[in-house]
Amino acid sequence: MAISSVCVFCAASPNLDEKFVIEAQKLGYFLAHEGMELVYGGGGSGLMGAVSDAVMEKKGHVLGFMPQDLMALEDASSRITRLTIVHDMHERKKSMYKHADAFVVLPGGFGTFDELCEVVTWRNLGFHKKPVIIVDLEGYWTHFKLQIEKGIAERIISESYRSSFTFVSTVEECFAILKNTTITANDDE
């Protein structure tokens, strides 16, 4: 079956270069056009706000998960289809994971790093087979990729991790993967 929901991990910071905002908006427009629901952390600012606003602008569906304690800090969006308030960060990540058929990672900070590393680890351990696509906009993830390669070269990271994610340079490359990937009902296993 085709991918019907995509979890996007990205920056909540409002102090971003406009070039990143434009790319997040492109991703949102694509998701809405393809009828793919956006699943994300529920924030209304930064790239989180840009991607969710773009989906909503094109009459798409957005499902956000926000921990109660972050409501004020992350500017929870009131402009989305459904915002679910959860107990803590662990429940947020578990909820996003459960509702997503695929993961897309845009530039972000430590929260994004955490989310990315967790879903890649879970995939490598065989907990799921969902695609994980890292969009290396403006070379943002280049050093992360180099760190992974260094870990593999030093035999600290297993070579099997290379098949746990896909790096792309543009959101357009990400679109092609999302459109052409099929998933099975047991991709969570």
Image: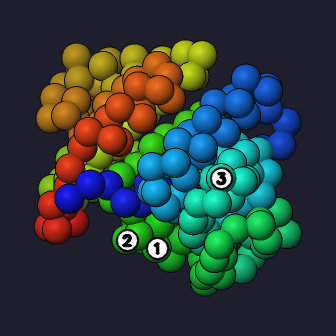
The kind of secondary structure element at disc 2 is helix
Q: Does residue 50 appear to the left or right of 6 in the view shown?
A: right
Count residues near mark 2 (Cα–Cα under 10 Å), then give few for <14, some for 14-19, many for 20+.
few
Q: Quadrant of residue 147?
A: top left
Picture disc at residue 98: 2
The kind of secondary structure element at disc 1 is helix
- Which of pointers 2 and 3 lies earlier in the amino acid sequence? 3
Which residue is rendered at x = 60% and y = 16% of the image? 138
Which residue is rendered at x = 73% and y = 23% of the image? 19
Residue 141 rendering spot, x and y as whole percentages: 51, 24
> Marks 1/3: CA distance?
24 Å
For badge 3, the amino acid type reads Lys
Q: Say which residue label 1 marks.
A: 95
Image depth: mark 1 or mark 3 in front: 3
**Residue 89 visible in the picture:** no
User: Which of the two residues, 56 or 155, is positioned nearer the viewer here?
Assistant: 56
> Marks 2/1: CA distance?
5 Å
Picture disc at residue 58: 3
Count residues near mark 1 (Cα–Cα under 10 Å), then give few for <14, some for 14-19, many for 20+.
some
Whether tag 2 and tag 1 are in contact, CB under 8 A, the answer is yes
> Marks 2/3: CA distance?
25 Å
Q: Quadrant of residue 18?
A: top right
For badge 2, the amino acid type reads Lys
